[in-house]
Image (cartoon, rainbow, N blue to C red):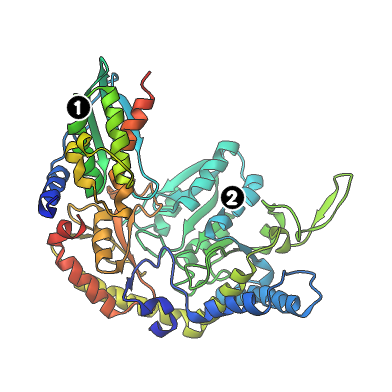
């Protein structure tokens, strides 16, 4: 649906790499252009017309985010993207919070951005990282989380939707469980916030991270939402202009309040404004409508490809538009190159979840990740090409 | 070169590559290589004795181009002196990067003389690996 809103779709392509980044609708591009063409100016302290307008738009995006995911406006921090958001939580909050002997629960399907920061901080503090086992379908369940929790468990950090398996984790139940146990609950929403209704408060999240560019917005901007009282405790990773109240010769200084203290320097202004427009655009379609549409597409795709010879599908039953597969005996990258020959854009690799190989016994997969502007014709094209893959090497060599 | 012939050589080496599988032997030089632009991840080992390449072996997951290039290169380099190998690598890399090179020095490796730009890094993997191992040669 809404295909006409996306200039990229005028090209003869099938875009199935939405897990990596999404296409941008005209309204988002226009909104950013308008900033550059009509009211370029810096935010904060501008006393002239263009700057006042820019400031209004920039700060207004916090209200949009707060409506979009149900949090308070002053709990919204603009970041460079999900990776930056998670690093801010780990090195800004957890560095002070965690002690030697504490346990952080992760799992092996997590993206590098929700593993490596923890591994790095662990070197410094000596807390323990435990990986919650996945079930037989490579999914993360609340039961397995509960089995791993002890009185040493201080943090559960997970992706709401895994970027390879595509399983939707039950954040509502997990959040409730963590809150009752006094465990901090960190959610990577990069693959969920663009695709379904996510509710920060209702799911008892403590921190939620997501990126603009995976939800029709521009690259270079993302969001960290944190519970206000935790953000008060959290240290900024970046110091400079815009985030301090004063600093003096005697080394004294005072930082501004949340969220301003986390936004040193000139932020990506056009991108924040673009992100706001993307949020408005998604809300105008409706997140439930988007999710239901993607589920219909997924059912259609699975129905069509489940009987193709030599096709191994790793996640037939998950509730997201992510499908990972391999053609038996063909290296994932060769399959992606083959599909590109027919202008079908997919991603091959480990998708940054480099430990998933321990569970799934295969390092690399081909990933199709859908969004609401994909349609059944896209799927038919993919299915056709996959059905005729016996000549794959003639095509790619 | 005839396209079918080229494809046949590449596919033969991909489906049944030379010296796939590593062995336990500390007298070998070793390296792991993965290119920044692709997902290939290969381990290499090479034995040099009296200045001559006696053996090269590899293992790992990789695409058709890098696997076949590895196989062809292994077959071609075994028996050559270290100096000859260095010369071959320079010429091979020049060929892949569309610079001047001596075709006569490259034997069957010439099948990659017309590689698509986005596959260059795949074709370069074995060459980078051998080069890395030679750096460790004292």
Q: Is residue A383 above or below residue A116?
A: below
Q: Nearer the viewer, residue B110 or B74?
A: B110
Which chain is home to disc 2? A
Quadrant of the image occupied by residue A345: bottom left
- Identify the residue shown where x is 21% and y is 57%: A396
Check if mark 1 and mark 2 are on a common chain. Answer: no
Can residue B6 be seen here? The reply is: yes
**Mark 2 surroundings: few (<14), some (14-19) or many (≥20) residues within 10 A:** many
Disc number lying in front (1 or 2): 1
Q: Tell me residue B53's x, y (percent).
A: 23, 23
Q: Are marks 1 and 2 in contact (CB under 8 Å)?
A: no
User: Could you tell me how far apart the alpha carbons at marks 1 and 2 are, in whole angstroms?
Assistant: 50 Å
Left or right: residue A16 versus residue A176 is left
- Identify the residue shown where x is 21% and y is 49%: B64
Quadrant of the image occupied by residue A181: bottom right
Left or right: residue A12 versus residue A107 is left
Q: Tell me residue A121's x, y (percent).
A: 57, 42
Q: Tell me residue A387's x, y (percent).
A: 15, 67
Q: Is residue A80 above or below residue A94?
A: below
Q: Nearer the viewer, residue B87 or A319?
A: B87
Q: Secondary structure at mark 2?
A: helix
Q: Tell me residue A160's x, y (percent).
A: 46, 63
Question: Which residue in the structure is indicated by mark 2?
Answer: A90
Which chain is home to disc 1? B
Q: Secondary structure at mark 1?
A: loop
Can residue A181 be seen here? The reply is: no
Quadrant of the image occupied by residue A86: bottom right
Q: Is residue B56 above or below residue B70?
A: above
Q: Is residue A363 above or below residue A24?
A: above
- Identify the residue shown where x is 29% and y is 69%: A343
Question: Which residue in the structure is indicated by mark 1?
Answer: B78
Count of numbered badges drawn on the protein: 2
């Amino acid at each position: 649906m809404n295909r006409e809103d996306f200039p990229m779709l005028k090209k003869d392509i099938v875009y199935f790499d939405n897990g990596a980044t999404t296409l941008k609708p005209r309204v988002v591009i226009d909104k950013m252009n308008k900033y550059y063409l009509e009211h370029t100016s810096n935010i904060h302290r501008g006393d002239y017309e263009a700057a006042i307008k820019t400031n209004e738009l920039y700060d207004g995006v916090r209200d949009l985010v707060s409506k979009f995911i149900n949090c308070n406006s002053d709990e919204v921090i603009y970041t460079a993207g999900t990776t930056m958001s998670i690093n801010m939580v780990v090195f800004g909050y957890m560095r002070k919070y965690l002690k030697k002997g504490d346990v952080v629960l992760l799992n092996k399907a997590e993206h590098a951005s929700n593993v490596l920061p923890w591994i790095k901080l662990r070197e410094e503090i000596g807390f323990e990282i435990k990986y919650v086992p996945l079930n037989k379908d490579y999914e993360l369940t609340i039961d397995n989380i509960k089995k791993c929790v002890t009185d040493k468990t201080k943090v559960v950090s997970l992706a709401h939707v895994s970027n390879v398996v595509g399983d939707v984790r039950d954040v509502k139940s997990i959040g409730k469980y963590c809150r009752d146990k006094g465990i901090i609950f960190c959610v990577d929403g990069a693959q969920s916030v663009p695709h379904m209704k996510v509710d920060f408060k209702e799911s008892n999240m403590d921190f939620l991270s997501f990126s603009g560019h995976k939800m029709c917005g521009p690259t270079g901007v993302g969001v960290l939402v944190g519970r206000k009282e935790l953000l008060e405790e959290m240290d900024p990773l970046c110091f400079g202009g815009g985030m301090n109240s004063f600093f003096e010769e005697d080394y004294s200084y005072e930082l501004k309040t949340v969220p301003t203290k986390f936004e040193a320097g000139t932020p990506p202004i056009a991108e924040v404004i673009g992100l706001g427009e993307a949020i408005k655009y998604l809300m105008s379609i409706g997140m439930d409508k988007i999710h239901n549409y993607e589920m219909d597409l997924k059912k259609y795709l699975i129905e069509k490809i489940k009987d193709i010879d030599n096709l191994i599908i790793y996640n037939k039953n998950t509730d997201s538009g992510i499908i990972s597969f391999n053609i038996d005996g063909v290296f994932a990258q060769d399959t992606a190159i083959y599909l590109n020959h027919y202008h079908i854009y997919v991603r091959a690799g480990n998708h940054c979840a480099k430990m998933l190989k321990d569970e799934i016994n295969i390092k690399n997969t081909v990933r199709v990740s859908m969004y609401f502007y994909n349609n059944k014709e896209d799927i038919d094209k993919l299915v056709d090409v996959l059905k005729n893959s016996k000549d794959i090497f003639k095509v790619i060599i | 070169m005839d396209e079918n012939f080229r494809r046949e050589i590449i596919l033969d080496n991909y489906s049944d590559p030379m010296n796939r599988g590593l062995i336990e032997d500390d007298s070998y030089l070793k390296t792991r290589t993965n290119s920044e632009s692709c997902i290939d991840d290969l381990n290499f080992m090479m034995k040099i004795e009296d200045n001559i390449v006696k053996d090269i072996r590899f293992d790992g997951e990789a695409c058709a181009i890098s696997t076949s290039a590895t196989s062809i290169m292994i077959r071609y380099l075994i028996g050559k002196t270290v100096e000859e190998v260095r010369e071959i690598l320079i010429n091979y890399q020049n060929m892949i990067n569309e610079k001047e090179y001596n075709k006569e020095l490259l034997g069957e490796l010439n099948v990659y003389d017309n590689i698509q730009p986005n596959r260059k890094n795949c074709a370069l993997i074995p060459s980078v690996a051998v080069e890395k191992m030679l750096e460790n040669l004292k």
